[in-house]
Image: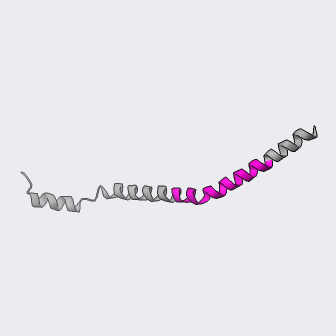
Amino acid sequence: MQMSIKSKLALFKRDTSGAVSVEWVVLSAAVIGLGIGVITIFSDGTNGAAASSNEHLAQAMTTAATTN
């Protein structure tokens, strides 16, 4: 026996099996967005720290090379 279009639409409306997938996609997108935001905020600070460390290391190596 074939179902009418109205009954098929009613079944489709009550079906929530795909809702979990949509929630996971939204949650994953939010986590990725937050991660990109955090990386953007802290990248300037880490670049500054790396440059400072590089300068101190270069100075220490120059001092060590000239004292021997």
Image quadrant in which you'd find residue 45: bottom right
Front position in the image: 26 or 63: 63
Q: Position of residue 53 (x, y in %)?
A: 75, 50
Magenta extent: 35-56
As drawn, is 20 to the left or to the right of 60? left
- Residue drawn at x 37%, y 59% is 23
Front position in the image: 26 or 4: 26
Q: Position of residue 13 (x, y in %)?
A: 21, 62
As drawn, is 37 to the left or to the right of 21? right
Magenta-colored stretch includes residue 52: yes
3 relative to 66, above or below: below
**Colour setup of the view:** one colour
40 relative to 60, above or below: below
- Residue drawn at x 93%, y 41% is 67
The single residue placed furthest to the top in the displayed view is 68
Image quadrant in which you'd find residue 49: bottom right
- Residue drawn at x 14%, y 57% is 8
The single residue placed furthest to the left in the displayed view is 1
Q: Position of residue 17 (x, y in %)?
A: 29, 56
Magenta-colored stretch includes residue 33: no
